[in-house]
Every structure is written in C-alpha cells, then in structure tokens.
Amino acid sequence: MSEPTRKPVQLTDVSMLGLGAMGSALAAALLDAGRSVTVWNRTPDRAAESTTRGARGADSVREAVTASPVVVACLLKYDSVRDTLGPVAGELRGRTLLNVTTTTPNESRQLAAWAAEFGITYLDGAIMAVPAMIGTREGQIFYSGSRTAYDTLRPTLDIWATSEFHGEDAGRASLVDLAMLSGMYQMFAGFLHGAAMVAPMGMSASEFAARQGPFLVAMAQGLAGFAEVVDGGDYTVAGQQSLDFSDLSHIVRASEEEDVDPAPIAMVQALISRQIDAGHGREGFARIYESLRATTRPTARPEEGTAA
C-alpha cells in the first residue's frame, strides 16, 4: 500500500537548491518580486548573498525541501540532482519539483519517472539566458512535464523570463534548449576557426570579430528561408544555392595552407559531400539536413506543441 500524500508545511513560497551564479539570480528575482524563499547550497557561504537580501537559509537539504511547496533544483548536473534529492525523496512527496539543472532529454525523463514513484509533481525547465538576463523579458525558459504545475506556477515562472511550455514529455524542454545551444556553439567554433585562419597575416581576433559579427547577423536572416525549404521537403525549389556550388573544399585547403586545423569547416564539407555523392548535387544547400535528421520524422501531437 502506497504511503498517503502528506500536505506540505509551508514556511516560504519557494525553496532554491543550488546558489551558483544562475541559482542566485533566480532567488534574487523571486525576492525582488516579493516571494519568500528558502535557500540551500552545498557550500554554505554561497547563501550569504541571498540571505542578506531576505531569503531564509537552510542548514540541510531536508530542511530546505520541507520549507516550501515548490522546490527548485539548480545544481551542477543530473547526478548531482539525484544525489542531492535521493535521500529526501520522502519529504518531497506532495510537493512540486522544478528542475532547471542542465540535463539531456532522457535524463529529464528519468527524473520525471523517479519523481512519479514518490508522488512528486515534476516540471523540467531549460534556461536560455545568462544570469544577468534573469528578471527581464530578454531571456527564455522552456518548460515540459506537468502541465498543471506549469499553469499553477506561471505567475512565478514569468518573474524570471519569458516562459514557454513544450508538452508533458519531460524531455522536450531540454531537447529544444540543447538544439539551440548546438547552433550557438557551432557558430562560436566557426568564428574561432576563422580567427585562427587570419591570425598568420597579423589580424587580431578583435579585428576579425568586428568584420565577422555584422556578417553573421546579416546571414542569420536566411534561417527562415532554410526552415521553409526543410519543412516543405523540396530541395529543388528555385532560388537556392546548390550543393555543387556550395563545395567548401577550397576553405578546407586554405585552412590547411595556413597550418590551421580545418575540423569545423571540414565537418560541413563532409555533410555536403555525402549528399553530392548520393546524387543530389543540383539541389539546395539545405539538403544537408537530410544527412543529420533522424530516419523518421515524428509528427507533433496537438497537446505536445509549444504554448507560451
């Protein structure tokens, strides 16, 4: 027979576990908005800033999770969430756990399954912001998991950033977050590769950035066009740059001539070559998506769609 759900004892509105730069920013925004907050950090002195602002400090994880009906975990990684919360799973029963620790989609699903075993309402959050953006509309936080928890907590969630719900599959918020970060890091790598290419001629990275930055901003306007082609599934529509024309082997060679590792651009060239070798050279550059995508395209069910 399962243990009956206990009504949480509320001392504060929210308990924040983890007071690194992001956890501290989340706690500060809640305090500034008039929410009462209990804070805990593995290294106690990290809580000083929050307690000075009015937060209630907790000496243990157990004390922290029993102080509020909503517990926010902003820790280092998946293992740290399980290690921290595992011993207090019983005390979390009947409460809502909002995990904003960066996890993979499957790790988020595993946390949701673990929470369900103990009668814990689970909501996963993926933060698309730096700490300075918390408390503004500039940042975004994606959520997935319990729709009821999202709707109930929405007034609190909107204190932090623009909120988006991506469905009851707890892994969806993480998936969108990591997909967006993939594009960002590959852009950064491309910039650093270019800076390395021009370094032998005496151009500083700062000088190169002054040229590259505006160019990348202008090129980003093409994303919508690529997306339209991909969604339409027809890579022969007029107005596209062909794969044959997009051959980047000259950039690879130029990089090698400057004794610079061509790995970032060579990766793109490999995707282009794969499609050309398959007989699609006359089709548009966007076709490299077919080299990357899953073998089947899942169709999003209405309840799984994005909602603001």
Image: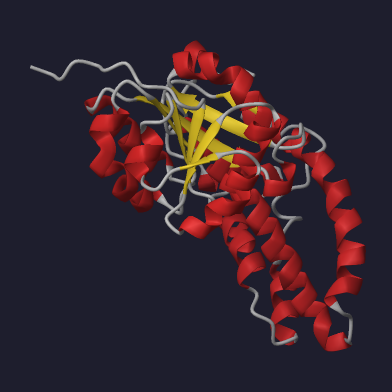
Residue 265 appears left or right of 107? right
Residue 32 lies, in percent from the top left, at 70, 33
Q: Residue furthest left?
A: 1
Q: Which residue is found at the position 22% from the left and 27% from the top?
A: 117
Residue 18: x percent and y percent?
Answer: 48, 48
Quadrant that contains the C terminus: top right
Viewed as shown, does residue 94 lie left or right of 189? Answer: left
Residue toward you, 125 or 85:
85
**How did the renderer colour the structure?**
secondary structure
166 sits to left or right of 132: left
x then y, percent, for residue 29? 67, 36
Name above or below for residue 158 compared with residue 125: above
In this view of the protein, which residue sits in the foreground, 179 or 21? 21
Vertical comparison of 23 with 69: above or below: below
User: Which residue appears at 62% of the width and 43% of the height?
Assistant: 180
Q: Is residue 128 visible?
A: no
Would residue 33 be seen by someone viewing this image from the given angle?
Answer: yes
In the image, what residue occupies the spot 36% across and 39% down? Answer: 63
Residue at image coords 36%, 31%: 66
Count of numbered circles in the view: 0
Identify the image quadrant of the N terminus: top left
Of residues 97 and 37, which is closer to you in this image?
37
Depicted 299 relative to depicted 102: above or below:
above
Q: Which image quadrant for residue 61?
A: top left
Please state the horizontal and vertical placement of residue 101, each as a whole percent of the image: 48, 45
